[in-house]
Image: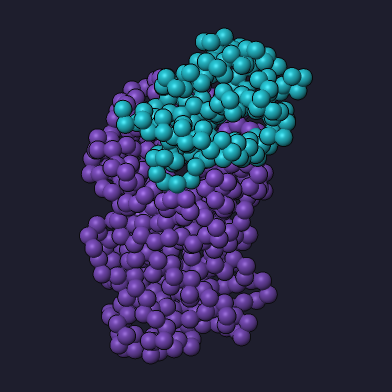
Amino acid sequence: MTRLFFSLLLAAAALVAQGPNPAQAQQGPLRLEITEGVIEPMPFAVADFVPDSPAAAEMGEQIARVVAADLSGTGLFREIPEDAHISRVSSFEAPVRFADWKAVNAQALITGGVSVTGERLTVRFRVWDVFSGVELGNGLQFVGTTDGWRRMAHKVADQVYSRITGEGGYFDSRVVFVSESGPKDNRRKRLAIMDYDGANVQYLTDSSSIVLAPRFSPTGDRVLYTSYESGFPRIYVLDVGRVQRQVLPTPQGEMSFSPRFSPDGRTVLYSVSTGGNTDLYAMDIASGQSQRLTTAPSIETAPSYSPDGSRIVFESDRSGTPQLYVMPAAGGEAERISFGQGRYGTPVWSPRGDLIAFTKQSKGRFHIGVMRTDGSQERLLTASFLDEGPTWAPNGRVIMFTRETQGAAGRSQLYSVDISGRNLRPVPTPDGGSDPSWSPLLD
Amino acid sequence: MNLLRKRAAIRAAMAGVALLAVSACSNVTGQDDMGTGAGAGMTGSGQAGQAGDPTSPAYFQQAIGDRVLFAVDQSTLGDEARAVLEQQAQWLITNGDYIATIEGHADEQGTREYNLALGARRANSVKEFLVLRGVAANRLTTVSYGKERPIEICSEEACYAKNRRAVTVLAGGLTG
């Protein structure tokens, strides 16, 4: 095995240079095929990342904990707890005593090293197939700053996930959402952004006006959202880094809402209500020029582009009840794709392009579901009093959504679920949460 | 039939607890002030005047009724709603200093986006009716709050029925 390290520079939270060739991951003997069926989670162990100085010791433990939490959180892996470990890894370079890890039934082992020099943090790791005693892929090194340690841990976990499953990771990503507090008849809403796992929450607006349905740009640098701050729902574009915003130049005096970026980040799709009729429009952000895409007297809303930008899926009640339709990106003939019993809304094209996630209302229950882009193979992943507003993880394997509980004390909370329907879990937020939008993988 | 009876019962209940209705109304106004930010010229409950004075916003709110209700998913106006709106139109024609914002609302069953669009339809139904009855269109604006501003918070039809509403909120009238 080579001892080649790819050195990555994590400057100002930006990772420059490339990860390893994905083909390398394919060659590993340790492989978890993610199929739709129920699988047995793969047992793994993470040794505390070995510190090169006392100052790095705490960070080594914390990074190992975040890596383990990321992997366990997928439902695809099961951690062998630290107190069951027989071996302690005391040197990153020392040979691994595989027998000790076999004895605790760990199939995969992650070892790492941490060094801290002033603000500078270097994290190295290796992934081992315990039963064959072979390293999976090559060791990798990330260099960044100490305050970005969680991101570096997520990057390690993304690499491990990717090498074992052969699919892209999603841990080094963020979620923008609406933080909710107060009772149902006086709910306070403000925009917030956090790491995908609920850490590092920051608020982007105050709660002085209603804010709805933020949406990340394809590079994660901007957020579109709807706000009532003018007394009227209008769409705003927020620069996440500078927390500066501008209003989208939609017609004065007409409600505009339900915005979403095009895959190239230059165009915004949205709805405008005029005289009670809601239609879809597209606006070029740079020029402010808009184009009307639908002209039906029915409600057309909740648009989402296909990842190649050629088509738009949206919700319309032109047939009498809300259903899903697909049309060319420039407008034109729309084809209905939802035919099951019930009402369909908030369709979102997956980043892989193969599936559309949606909200379904049927027999007094709400569901998050997925279907192929032609409407076939519909599968419902959740069921509750009120589930709505799916958003895709960057790798297209996990969906986050809003669940609201029933009754006068009803509360909104973010949840995530695997597209197999397994691993439903709440996403921790300081207050209630709704309308999540998942960023792409960060650079 | 069932629905009509239910609505009649709800209206009777609303009339029976006038005090509650008044507090609910002022509550709604307070939230709207928050939603609209500036709230300039809004008729707060403090300046609503006496319900006994037929030119007062309080009379409009309480004696005539500032809101109409809708069936599930519908934006068409029933007989009761039309009767209320006839009186609203007369009042607005008589009291020409006022302008009004018609707020459309939905119950919590339905997605956020669809309910915003549905609320817009409801507000527009009311506006069109008032315009047909002679209120100048430029005195009326519409806005939808979708399911964002329920006045009743239970998850039952009794609450949903009151939340599926369009409320005519007066503004101006400082000289009246």
Figure check: A345 above or below A116: above
Colour scheme in use: by chain
Across and down, in percent, residue A303 comes to: 43, 34
Say which residue appears at 32% left-offset and 51% top-offset: A383
Between A362 and B11, which is closer to the camera in this rendering? B11
Can residue B35 be seen in this snapshot? no
Residue A427 position, x and y percent, is: 46, 60
> Can you say which quadrant of the picture contains the N terminus of chain A?
bottom left
| Quadrant in the rendering for residue B10 | top left
State the count of labels: 0
Q: Residue at x 39, y 61 (%)?
A: A425
Q: Is residue B161 visible?
A: yes
Along the horizontal axis of the image, is A216 left or right of A405? right
Query: As drawn, is A318 to the left or to the right of B62?
Result: left
> Which of B130/A170 is in front?
B130
Closer to us: B91 or B129: B91
Residue at the (37%, 38%) spot, across then down: A345
Considering every residue shown, the one lying at the far right of the view is B175
- The picture places residue A30, in percent across and down from the top left corner, at 29, 71
Q: Give residue B95's position: percent from left, percent from top.
A: 67, 15
Residue closest to the eye, A2 or A110: A110
Residue drawn at x 54%, y 45% as measured from the top left: A185
Q: Which chain is cyan?
A: B
Residue A170: which quarter of the image?
bottom left
Chain assigned purple: A
The answer to which quarter of the image holds residue A106 is bottom left
